[in-house]
Image (tube, rainbow, N blue to C red):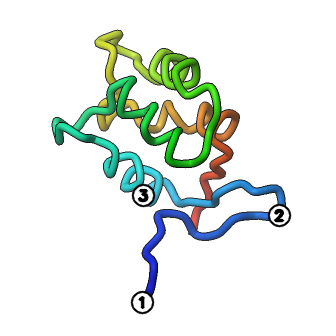
Amino acid sequence: MAIKTYYRCLSGNGEREMTMQEFKKWLKKYDADKDGRISKDELRDAIRATGGWFTRWKSRKGVRSADVNGDGFIDVHEIENLVEFAKTHLRVKIVEF
C-alpha cells in the first residue's frame, strides 16, 4: 500500500521539500473546523505532527508572523507569509517544480 505524503522528500539535513501548493494542502489538513483558516491550535497540531518541539511557542510565533490583518488566524491570503517561519522553525523548504 502506498503512503501519500504532502512533501516530496527529506533532504540530507532533514528538511521537508514541498511546493507552495503542497505546503498549502498540508496546512489545510490541519484545519480542524474547516473554516479555511489556520488557528494557533491548528498550527500547533501541524508542528506536533512533524515531531517539533516547543509547539505552543512556535504556533504563537507562527501566527503572529503570518497574520497580517491581526485577527489571530492565518487565512488563504496569509499562508505565503508563513513560508519564512516554516523554513526556520518547521524545517520545510519550499521549492518550485
In the rendering, at what x and y percent does residue 69 appear? 33, 13
Which disc number belongs to residue 1? 1
Dot 3 surroundings within 10 Å: few (below 14), some, or many (20 or more)?
A: few
Q: Residue, x 51% and y 33% (percent of image)?
A: 82
Question: Is residue 74 found left or right of 60 in the rendered image?
Answer: left
For marks 3 and 2, the one nearer the N-term is 2
Which residue, given by chain and number where applicable, does mark 2 sit on?
12
- Judged from the image, the secondary structure of the residue bearing numbered disc 1 is loop
Q: Label 3 vs label 2: CA separation?
A: 22 Å
Residue in front for this viewpoint, 34 or 19: 34
- Would you name the residue on which mark 3 appears? 21
Residue 32, horizontal then vertical, whole percent: 24, 40
> Separation of disc 1 and disc 2 at Cα?
26 Å
Q: Nearer the viewer, residue 80 or 51?
A: 51
Q: Residue furthest bottom?
A: 1
Which amino acid type is marked by label 1?
A: Met
Q: Amino acid at mark 3?
A: Gln
Crowding at mark 1 (Cα within 10 Å: few <14, some 14-19, many 20+): few
Mark 1 or mark 3, whichever is nearer to me: 1
Dot placed on the residue nearer the N-terminal end, 1 or 2? 1
The structure residue drawn at horizontal position 33% and vertical position 15%, both measured from the top left corner, is 72
**Residue found 62% across the figure and 34% down from its top:** 84
- Residue 60 lies, in percent from the top left, at 49, 17
Up-down: is 73 above or below 19?
above
Give the image quarter of residue 22. bottom left
Query: Which numbered disc, 1 or 3, marks the residue that appears first in the sequence?
Result: 1
Q: At numbered mark 3, what does the secondary structure look like: helix, strand or loop?
A: helix
Q: For residue 90, what is the image quadrant?
A: top right
